[in-house]
Amino acid sequence: MSTYRSAFPMLVCDDLTRSLAFYQDALGFSITYRFPAEGDPVYVAVSLPDGSRLGLGQVAPDGRGVHGRPQRPTAGHRFELCVYHDDVDAAVTELAAQGHPVLLEPADTPWGERVAFVADPDGNPVMITREALTS
């Protein structure tokens, strides 16, 4: 059996510029690749300092991907992203001040993490979480 090397999620965005601003400016991702290299991109790859990667692509004019299938589900959200932060409350306060909708205020979980959810510009839930504190 072949061995897979790595993977990363790719999001389809209604407005790539708006989504890129959220992931880059609000969450701190850096652009590692853009296509085309000049002019308005239709796809960008972004990453965090730990190497976490994410692809962002503009929804195609016909609503179908390179694979020929619809890029949007008929119901429900398309994607959830988990992003770790040392201070969930401060991060959510900052994101809310920037106008990003808070879907779930910060709360402690039974498994020890502190979590909150905000919406990205396309309405996808983004979980902001702090890893469980160990004693």
Image (cartoon, rainbow, N blue to C red):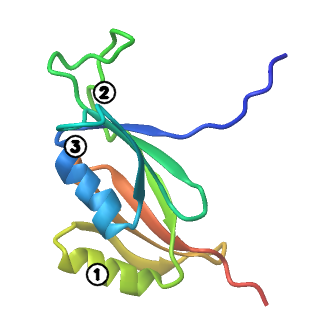
Q: Distance between the residues labelled 2 and 1?
A: 30 Å
Q: Is residue 5 left or right of residue 65?
A: right
Q: Which of marks 2 and 3 is nearer the N terminus?
A: 3
Q: Where is residue 43 in the image (x, y as percent from the top left)?
A: 32, 35
Specify the label residue 94 is tagged with: 1
Q: Residue furthest front?
A: 38
- Label 2 residue SS: loop
Circle 1 sits in a helix, a strand or a loop, which is it? helix
Q: Given the image, on which type of amino acid does mark 3 rest?
A: Leu
Describe residue 89's horizontal placement relative to residue 110 as left or right: left
Q: Residue at x 39, y 11 (%)?
A: 67
Judged from the image, the secondary structure of the residue bearing numbered disc 3 is helix
- C-alpha separation, residue under disc 2 versus residue under disc 3: 18 Å
Q: Is residue 99 left or right of residue 129?
A: left
Q: Are marks 2 and 3 in contact (CB under 8 Å)?
A: no
Q: In this view, does 80 lie above or below 66?
A: below
Q: Which residue is drawn at 44% across and 63% down?
A: 127
Q: Mark 2 points at which residue?
A: 73
Query: Looking at the picture, does residue 9 appear above or below residue 94?
Result: above
Q: Residue furthest toward the bottom?
A: 135
Q: Quadrant of residue 102?
A: bottom left
Q: Which of marks 2 and 1 is nearer the N terminus?
A: 2
Which label sits in the foreground, 1 or 3?
3
Give the labeled residue for mark 3.
Answer: 16
* Percent position of residue 77, x then y: 32, 41
